Every structure is written in structure tokens, then in C-alpha cells.
Image (cartoon, rainbow, N blue to C red):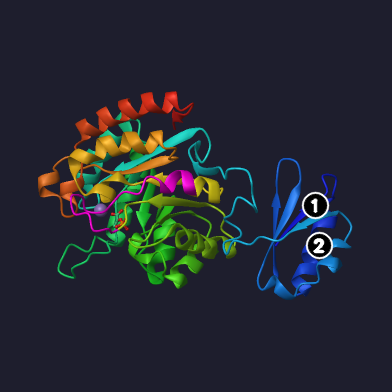
């Protein structure tokens, strides 16, 4: 349910409507907009006495939202959500934000070499996993806190923002302490305790689409985070599993315009996991920007043949430089710019 307040409704009126909602055992989410404030109501609203709310001073109208996702929906919040990531970088507006780096933090030297190239080519966010969710327990699991400390050094040395993955509730706070953006991976998209905890902290969250998740399921997962109070969520299309075996996953680029219509949250594309093949990253990056993505998450490695994870889909710094130039040109055509 969405309560739309009159344009001239005061803060006190909004607060008093929120109080009334809470008295009914529901949750009120005031959402100030450029022209008027709306109050999102979540919880079981089926028994709500609409007349009681309508009778409050300052209430213009009550809209019943039929979709199961509420706080993430365009109906609740028609404007695009623009998130300030730090260092003057925003996502969800005109800027297209490029996040790039290796799959995993392997060593200090490895991160420094790659980060320098990423920064030089115009990337704004450095990606690398310190905790890795691997299919096999025998594969490299990541450097853990030592990896987070290396990422902190990268941040200080190159003025790059950091995105890194939190794989469980136990380490989420530690990861959030070191990073600018907390990544929740495809395998954890429906780890509800992790989503709730990510909603209770203040760092921006990048939520990847599960390998077999519908867009509604992706949005419902994001709803868990917003429902806990954190509205800074970026969605990520990273490919889904289909019968096609020419790529590691099938990159569903149609998800971008669909999500844009369904939700106000920014959405980016990960063409590295989406294709699993280095030579397909550049063409799919071009297409992602053309289809309206707010950013890209790209795996870059200076020595992909010896990478400890995902070498086959990692592009070299030279290809990354070329990619930045090409998508910069496409961004201009789209009336956007590289952040
Ligand atoms: C990653 O970004 O390295 C990763 C593990 O991604 P995903 O969760 O999409 O598989
Ligand atoms: Mn990877």
C-alpha cells in the first residue's frame, strides 16, 4: 500500500500518519520525493481500514500496490534511485559506472598491477573477491581478511572505490567495514538471513541475480534488503542457466529494460560471468550499455592464464582499455557518460 501525501503536507503530518500505520502493526517507509512525500506501507495490509488513514490530515490518496514487491517497485517510487557511492561517483543517474578487477584477490602485487591499469583506463570501482563462493571445496577459497586489507591498500593508493563479496552473515560486518559496496553473489541471492543483515548495515549492496531466478524473485530478494532500511541496492544481471552451452551462462540482456520498468533501482551487467569467455566480454559490454545498463562489472587480469579463479573469462588490461573507449562512445550516443 502506498499513501500519497498532499504537496503541502508538513513533516509533522507525515510523522503522524507513520505513527498511525505503526499502531496497526505495519511498517511505514516515508519516501520524500521532489514534489511530494509518499509513505510505503509493508506488512499484511489486507485488514487495514483505509478510511482511518484517509481521514488523517495531509493524506491525498491511497494506492493499493498489487505486485508482491513493494519498496523496490516503480509504483512506490517513480524516480530512478541514484546512489552516491563515494568519491563523487553516483550510479542510477546519467553516469555509467565501470567496476573492474580480478575475480579474486590473489596477492598484493597482483591487485596493485591490475588496479593501476583499471584506474588509468577510467574504471571507478575495483572489484576482487576476498571470500570466494566456489563450486568445489578444493578450489581457491580466497585470502579472507588478508585480502580485505589488500583492497584497503588499493583504495588508498589509486583512489578507487572497492566492491567485494560477502558470502555469509558471519563475515558480513568485516567485509562491510573494508568495502564501499558489499556484493551478494548469485548463489546467495535467496540467502534471506544474509539479505536481512545486508539491509541492517549502511554500505551499498550489489545484489546479483541467482542462476535460475526470475526477475520477480530478484526483486523480492532486493525487497528483503530495503525492508530492513537500506535503500542503497544495485541489481546485477550475470547470466542465467539455460540449455545453451556455448557460453557459461546465458546473459539475459532483456532483463535490463524489464527491470527498469518494474523498479527504480539501478541495474548493472556482469558480462564476464554472463559469458564465461574472454572474447565475448567486449561485444556483450557494448550491448549492455546500449540496452540501458547503469554500469558493468568486469573481470580483468594481467596474467589470465595463471589466475587462481575465472581466468578464462578475464580480459587483459589492454582489452579493458579498448573496452572503455568503445563503451564511452556508446554511452555518448545514449546521452550518458562514463562515471
Ligand atoms: C564473482 O563476481 O566473482 C562471482 C562469484 O559472481 P557470481 O556470484 O555472479 O557467480
Ligand atoms: Mn569470478
How far across and how far down the image is residue 333, in percent?
A: 43, 24
Q: Is residue 243 above or below residue 280?
A: below
- Callout 1 touching callout 2 (CB < 8 Å): yes
Q: Secondary structure at mark 1?
A: strand
Q: Can you give x and y, in whole percent of width and height, for residue 72 in the image?
A: 57, 55
Q: Residue 299: horizontal and vertical position, in percent? A: 26, 45
Q: Which residues are magenta?
A: 241-258
Which residue reaches farthest left? Answer: 305
Residue for badge 2:
17
Total label count? 2
Q: Establish if 12 lies above or below 127.
A: below
Q: Nearer the viewer, residue 286 or 46?
A: 46
Q: Residue at x 23, y 58 (%)?
A: 243
Q: Name the residue carrying label 1.
A: 5
* Quadrant of the frame with the C terminus: top left
Q: Is mark 2 within 8 Å of ligand 1?
A: no
Task: For marks 1 and 2, give the one nearer the viewer.
Answer: 1
Is residue 243 inside the magenta stretch? yes
Question: Within 10 angstroms of label 1, few (less than 14), some, or many (20 or more) residues?
Answer: many
Q: Residue lying farthest front?
A: 243
What residue lies at 80% left-to-right and 55% top-to-bottom?
61
Q: Main secondary structure of the magenta part?
A: loop
Q: Is 338 situated left or right of 79 in this image? A: left
What residue is at 35 percent from the left and 54 percent from the top? 164
Name the element at disc 2. helix
Report the Cα–Cα distance between label 1 and label 2: 9 Å
Q: Residue at x 25, y 34 (%)?
A: 320
Amino acid at each position: 500500500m502506498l499513501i500519497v501525501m498532499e504537496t503541502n503536507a508538513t513533516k509533522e503530518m507525515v510523522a503522524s500518519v507513520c505513527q498511525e500505520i505503526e499502531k496497526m502493526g505495519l511498517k511505514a517507509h516515508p519516501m520524500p520525493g521532489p514534489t511530494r512525500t509518499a509513505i510505503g506501507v509493508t506488512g499484511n495490509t489486507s485488514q487495514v481500514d483505509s478510511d482511518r488513514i484517509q481521514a488523517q490530515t495531509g493524506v491525498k490518496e491511497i494506492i493499493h500496490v498489487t505486485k508482491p514487491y513493494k519498496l523496490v517497485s516503480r509504483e512506490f517510487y517513480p524516480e530512478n534511485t541514484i546512489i552516491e557511492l563515494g568519491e563523487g561517483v553516483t550510479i542510477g543517474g546519467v553516469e555509467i559506472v565501470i567496476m573492474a578487477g580480478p575475480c579474486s584477490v590473489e596477492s598484493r602485487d597482483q591487485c596493485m598491477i591490475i588496479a593501476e591499469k583499471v584506474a588509468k583506463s577510467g574504471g571507478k570501482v575495483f572489484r576482487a573477491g576476498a571470500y570466494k563462493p566456489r563450486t568445489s571445496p578444493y578450489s581457491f577459497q580466497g585470502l579472507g581478511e588478508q585480502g580485505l586489507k589488500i583492497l584497503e591498500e588499493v583504495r588508498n593508493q589509486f583512489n578507487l572505490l572497492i566492491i567485494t563479496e560477502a558470502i555469509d552473515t558471519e563475515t558480513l560486518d568485516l567485509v562491510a567495514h573494508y568495502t564501499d559496496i558489499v556484493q551478494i553473489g548469485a548463489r546467495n541471492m535467496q540467502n534471506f538471513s544474509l539479505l536481512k543483515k545486508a539491509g541492517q548495515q549502511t554500505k551499498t549492496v550489489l545484489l546479483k541475480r541467482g542462476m535460475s531466478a526470475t526477475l520477480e524473485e530478484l526483486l523480492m530478494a532486493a525487497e528483503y534488503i530495503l525492508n530492513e532500511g537500506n535503500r542503497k541496492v544495485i541489481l546485477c544481471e550475470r547470466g542465467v542457466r539455460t540449455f545453451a552451452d556455448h557460453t557459461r551462462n546465458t546473459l539475459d540482456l532483456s532483463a535490463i529494460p524489464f527491470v527498469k520498468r518494474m523498479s527504480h533501482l539501478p541495474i548493472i551487467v556482469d558480462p564476464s560471468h554472463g559469458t564465461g569467455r574472454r572474447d565475448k566480454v567486449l561485444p556483450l559490454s557494448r550491448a549492455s550499455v546500449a540496452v540501458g545498463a547503469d554500469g558493468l562489472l568486469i573481470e580483468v587480469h594481467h596474467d589470465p592464464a595463471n589466475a587462481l579463479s575465472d581466468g578464462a573469462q578475464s580480459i587483459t588490461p589492454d582489452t579493458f582499455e579498448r573496452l572503455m573507449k568503445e563503451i564511452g562512445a556508446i554511452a555518448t550516443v545514449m546521452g550518458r557518460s562514463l562515471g
